[in-house]
Every structure is written in structure tokens, then in C-alpha cells.
Amino acid sequence: MLISHWPVRRTAIVGALALGSLFICFLTPPIDSAWAFYSPTTRAWELLAGSLIGLCLCNRSVEAARSVVTALALAGLAGIAFVFWAFNAGSHWPDLRTAVPVSAATALIATANTTVHRRILSARPLVFIGRMSYPLYLWHFPLIAFAEMNMNSAVPALLMSELLALSALLAWLTYRFIEQPIRFGAAAIRWKVAPLAAAMAATGLIGIAAVNTRGLPARFPQPIRNFMLSGTETESHWRCAVCLLMRQPASEFAPECAGHGGRPLLLIWGDSYGAALYPGLLHFSAERGYDVAQYTASACPPLIGYSPSERPYCKSIDDDVLLRINRLRPDVVILDATWGQTETVLREGLRRTVALLKAMNITNIVIIGPPPSWQGGGLSQNILYYYRETQQVLPVRTFHGSTDAWTQQRDALLHELSRKLGVRYISVRDVFCNESGCLSRTGPNDSELTAFDSGHLTVPGATFLAARTMDDLLDTIVPLRQ
């Protein structure tokens, strides 16, 4: 609309829109990477870069020197090559680095008919790939995504190669029998638009139905559907954005996080794994006569000085919790986290944390070890995997789909660190696992999952853990209670 009203200012308007989209993209925190990836607001600048090329090429009155144009094309080609070297599966996308491939592609498009284009980009294999690049993009993503969803482990290299080959075949068929006839076929435009609109509407309705029904669960029997957890059943007990900070500074901790003023006071300090422990401890608080405080933050372990780039508030939150502990003087400080950091980070971070707590005369410190961990989509997803393979419910005790080797290694490391630091250690793995496997279900008739994802305990799982570790926690404060 703006461009049609002010055609003279088209370039300025498109440029302003591109800069605005780019600004929003760069301001989006890494935790919102899914929104940044799928939202048109944060991705429009990439498309508008192409629009700017078209406007600038149409309006230019002076030809640039051939040497300058060739140099720009070479720079674009180098930028594309750099992306293959510098980007990996751990790279956040989109972010500031996204400007590299976008700028490189822009340079190549804007400098048509150079030596780079005639000698390199005009090669038949590259032209062939370019012509079907968009359908290739459309096909490879769902094929690989469905493969990952339906496997209880990483997609094998051979299968990945086969999927890419299938993607290429489907892309060519799409280009040849759908894209080409629609773009250049002799049929009237109305006979092209109506079927496409109907197909898009049908696809949208199917997607809405799948989302609203949480994946059409009726295709599974009722016993399996009972284990299809979304996570909201558990997270509603974590006091999210109140005592489990998400992307918030420490000042957002609510007053109720300190408990209700009762004694003895057990204080949980950790990340979302610590928040998952809270409902279990709360369950027995009235019966056993103690109070519970909760100071947790998503992806922020209780490691003083630890500051991951994707969680800029972690360091200040940990510093703040330390001050709150000094004011509250809890009878027991419970350190609970995912503990997925490197061994060096864990050793140094826990050493600093424990030393500072002891310097404040906080001596009853308990480190909670990692719970059983589950690969793929987590324990709930493993229920589906196992049912597809065996037509049976996952056994109560199992190693199926677990990453128990990692849990054992981390459990041993934390046990050693706790002993050296002079603090108590509770092995969650010892509570849940034995030589027959790790508990996948608990509760009446084994009807409740112990975790809903890769490791976060459900409320029944946290209650099960608390029931079996409460004496260990309270034994540290027997002198204080007497």
C-alpha cells in the first residue's frame, strides 16, 4: 500500500521495512529461536533484501566498473563458502550471522553476468540444482523431521542419504509436473488458482485439526493415550515466571518464593530440574513440618560465575539467590539442576558455590544428582516408540530409550565432587534405577509416568523421589530441630 501511494520512495520504504525486520530479529533472544525462525516479522528482511536488489537495478543510471562488479561477485561466492565452514548444528538461526549468507546471495544476484556467473554458476549441475532448489527445500525438511520423530535415536547416515536422494527425486517431480505447468502452462489462470487455493485450505484444516487434537491421539489405544503428556500437567506446578524465572531478571522473583516463614526451611536453588523437585517436597511439608523456598531459573544451574550466552541473566540471578540465602538463613540448601555442563565448568562452578555458602556459615548443603534421562522426544515419546515396535506398554523398569550411560557417568562425577567439597549427595539414579532398568512409571497401578520429557520429573515422579529422600534431607538438620 505504501509503495503504491509513494512510488518515488519505494526503495526507502522497502529499506526501512527490511531494517525494522532485521532489528527485531537481532533483538529476539535465543530462547525464542523457534519464533524467530518461523515468524514473518523476523524473516522478512531476507526477502526484502531481494526486493531492494530489484528496485536498485531498475533505478540505477550508472553502470559500475566491471572490476568492481566481479570483485563483489567473488566476495559473494566466498561468503557462501564461508557459511558451509562456519555454521553447524549448534548455530542459532536466525541471528547476526544470518546476514552473511543473505549478503552473499544478494551480492551474487546483484552482479549478474560476471566471470563468476558465466564460468561457475552457469555450470549445468548448479543450474539444475538451482531450478529445483525451492521444492528441494520444501521436501527435505518434512522427510527428515518425520524420520527423527519416528526413530528413538539419531537418524543413521545411510537413511539420511536415502532421504536426501528421495528429496531430490520429489523436488524434480514437483518442478517438472507442478511448478512448470503452473508457471508456463497454457491453462487459464482461474484453473490454476482454484485447485491451489483448495489444496492450501485443505492442508491448513488438516494442520489445525492435528494441533487442536494434539496429534490425532485417537489412533492409539486408551492406555497409551494416558501417557501422552504435553508437559503442562507438570509445569503448572513449577510456579513459572514467579519462582522459576524464564527470561526474567532476579528482581522478578515473587515474595512467595521465600516460603511461608516456617522452620525448618528447605531452599531449592537451581534450574527447571530444581523447579520439578518443588512439588514433591511441598507434598510432604505439612506432614513432616518444614517449609520450602524455591529460587530457580530456566537453564541457570547454581554455579556462581557461570554465564551462558543464551541465558544472559544467569550470573546475576545466581548472585542474587546467594544474597537471598544469606538473608533467609535456610536450614538446608538444595542444589538441583540438569548438570549438563562440561566437567570443568561443573568442578569450578560447584567449588565456588559451595565455598561461598560455607563462608556465610551455610553448612547443610545437598546436591541432587541427575534423574534418569531419556533420548528422542523423552519418556512420553518413548511410550509411543515402544508401542509401535511391540504393541505393548513400556515396562515399568526399562533401559529402552534411556541414556543411562550418561546418567551414570554424571552421577559418579557429582558424587565425587560432593565428597571432596564436604557436602551431602543424593543420587536420584539410585532411587529410580537398578540392574533391571529405570522406573518409567509409578503411582497406583503404575499409571503415572516418572518424567514427561528427557528428564524433568512429573509431580508423581517428584513425590516418589521426595518420599525416598526426605529422611536424608531432614537428618542434616536434626540438631537444629531438637
Image: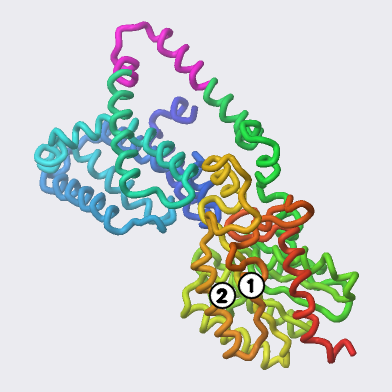
Residue at the image point whose x is 43% and y is 37% from the top: 142
Q: Is residue 197 magenta?
A: yes
Label ID, residue 430:
1
Q: Quadrant of residue 225?
A: top right
Q: Residues within 10 Å of mark 2 (few under 14, many from 20)?
A: many
Q: Is residue 16 visible?
A: no
Horizontally, is 435 left or right of 74 in the view?
A: right
Amino acid bearing label 2: Asp
Disc 2: which residue: 411
Q: Residues within 10 Å of mark 1 (few under 14, many from 20)?
A: some
The secondary structure making up most of the magenta span is helix
Residue at the image point whose x is 85% and y is 81% from the top: 264
Q: Quadrant of residue 46?
A: top left
Residue at the image point whose x is 76% and y is 56% from the top: 443
- Vertically, is 380 above or below 146? below
Q: Do the residues bearing badges 1 and 2 touch, measured as CB atoms within 8 Å?
A: yes
Q: Measuring from the top left, give residue 187's x and y in whole percent.
A: 34, 7
The stretch of residues the image draws in magenta is 178-201
Q: Is residue 426 magenta?
A: no
Label ID, residue 224:
none
Horizontally, is 190 left or right of 284 in the view?
A: left
Q: Is residue 366 visible?
A: yes
| Front position in the image: 3 or 268 | 268
Horizontally, is 421 left or right of 46 in the view?
A: right
Between discs 1 and 2, the one toward the N terminus: 2
Q: Measuring from the top left, give residue 221's x and y in whole percent.
A: 66, 35
Q: Measuring from the top left, give residue 114's x and y in whole percent.
A: 13, 40
Amino acid bearing label 1: Asp
| Front position in the image: 179 or 342 | 342
